Image: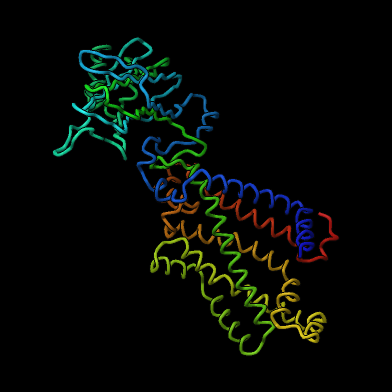
Amino acid sequence: MRGGLQTALTELLSSTTGKVGVTFFLVMLLISLYAIITNPLDFGTRLWNNPAAWADNPKNVPPAWTGIFEGSRRVNHTVFEASEPTEVRNTTRGIESVYTFNVDYTFDEAPTFTSFSIQNVTYHGSPPSTSVSVMRPDGRSLSLYRFVVPAPRNGETPPILRYQQTPFRVHLSGEPSVAVNVAQFLQDEFQVNISSSRLVGDIDEAVFGIPDTQGGGFQPLKGEYQIVVVARSQNERDSIEGVKFVLGGSQFGMMGTDSTGRDLARGLIFGFPVALAIGLITAVMATVIGTTMGIISGYTGGKTDILIQRFSDVLSNIPLLPILLFLAFILGQKLWIVIAILIVFGWPGMAIVIRSMVLQIRSGQLVEASISLGASRWRIMLRHIFPQMAPFVFAQMIFFTPAAILAEAGLSFLGLGDPSIPTWGQILDQGFRTGAVYVGYWWWVMPPGILIVLTALTFVLIALGMERVVDPRLRTVRQ
């Protein structure tokens, strides 16, 4: 058996299609291991389907590398975080903890958004307050936002804890109080009178730009910006463990983001182990069941043969997709249900083919000699019949793998996949549901579709490389 496996592997790797297929498969396997190691097993429920996990990401922006092909410089998405203040000073108003973030703004456009958040606030007396201001390259200072942590509730005793699980986050770009402060800044510094209601959609253009008196609007102001966050408290034991300022970019990561800000690269990478698990589990189980039933049916004959074959005929003639749709509605959208259905309806075809092969093998001299020596039925089926068809069985299992992956992708594309586990089909479905195809968000639709095709192609190439293993007569043909 070991020599047979070595021979099969040698023949597989001796062909160009086999080498390419095996290379693609190893790459998929490495990416799958990386996804499993770097992501929690409940990635779907904890992160992917949790909008709060992606709140600091821009929405519907292309991959960062697309900026190479454009003439203007697009804003890079940048997150500034600090757990310790840059400076602590004692003033007449209390203790001030200063957090400073430096921004080298060299972009030709305004940010898509700006946001500010704090987390893990602890205080012992009066609630602390925080303020956010911007020092601009032109020497002007702009006070953006001020926030006071909620006071103790009835019955609460120090230390008072706030924002332990979910941080306090404010979207500065749409905050009315920020618009009022920016409108006052424009009036005082540039004598430009714009109402705060009109500024709500253009706050970032005003903060990171100067008024365009001729064409209207704002021109980007490039240079060194300084974001200053000041936390004021009355007790030296008060603390803020996390301060964050987000400069929303117009491009993000390797694969961009969707309408909720999810990093599509993470979803696509997590789809690799899911696709392999669906394909391999379904293919192995369906092949094992089909091969076992086919050998028993073909060698045993009689009523057992008739029963297995009629049952196989019934299952193989039932259309799979309507059954998948029906059971998904009845039993729920669970991945294990999809895999189980694919296995149940996948093995009959294999059993029918294997039976026809066994009918030829059982009349051979090797089987007749084993019977004359008193070998049992199970020994003959296991030791003498199965090895002769093992290469064919392995090749069929490889062919069945992409079929299972495509079946799950099609079901997910129809909106009936398991919502707790991100798959390539689900990403495609969500892209079509939100109109990504019609508004030109190609990075949301093309990558999952390409990955599905490449995965199917990988196993097809391996199966084609197995032809010379299945049929030894082809080994004399040089590719």
Q: Residue at x 51, y 72 (%)?
A: 319
Q: Residue at x 38, y 12 (%)?
A: 137
In this view of the protein, can residue 208 be seen by the observer? no
In this view of the protein, can residue 350 be seen by the observer? yes
Q: Is residue 377 above or below residue 44?
A: below
Q: How is the image coloured?
A: rainbow
Residue 402 point in image, percent of width and height: 59, 59
Residue 355 point in image, percent of width and height: 67, 79
| Residue furthest right in the image | 476
Q: Which is more toward the observer, 230 or 67?
A: 230
| Residue furthest left in the image | 154
The number of numbered discs placed on residues in the rendered structure image is: 0
Q: Residue at x 45, y 46 (%)?
A: 437
Residue 43 point in image, percent of width and height: 44, 48
Q: Which is more toward the observer, 144 or 85?
A: 85
> In the image, is 444 to the left or to the right of 368?
left
> In the image, is 2 to the left or to the right of 286?
right
Q: Quadrant of residue 399?
A: bottom right
Q: Quadrant of residue 94?
A: top left
Q: Quadrant of the C terminus?
A: bottom right
Q: Quadrant of the N terminus?
A: bottom right
Residue 379 point in image, percent of width and height: 72, 78
Q: Quadrant of residue 471?
A: bottom right
Q: Is residue 195 above or below residue 435?
A: above
Q: Is residue 400 above or below residue 100?
A: below
Q: Is residue 19 above or below residue 178?
A: below
| Residue furthest bottom in the image | 302
Q: Which is more toward the observer, 60 or 235?
A: 235
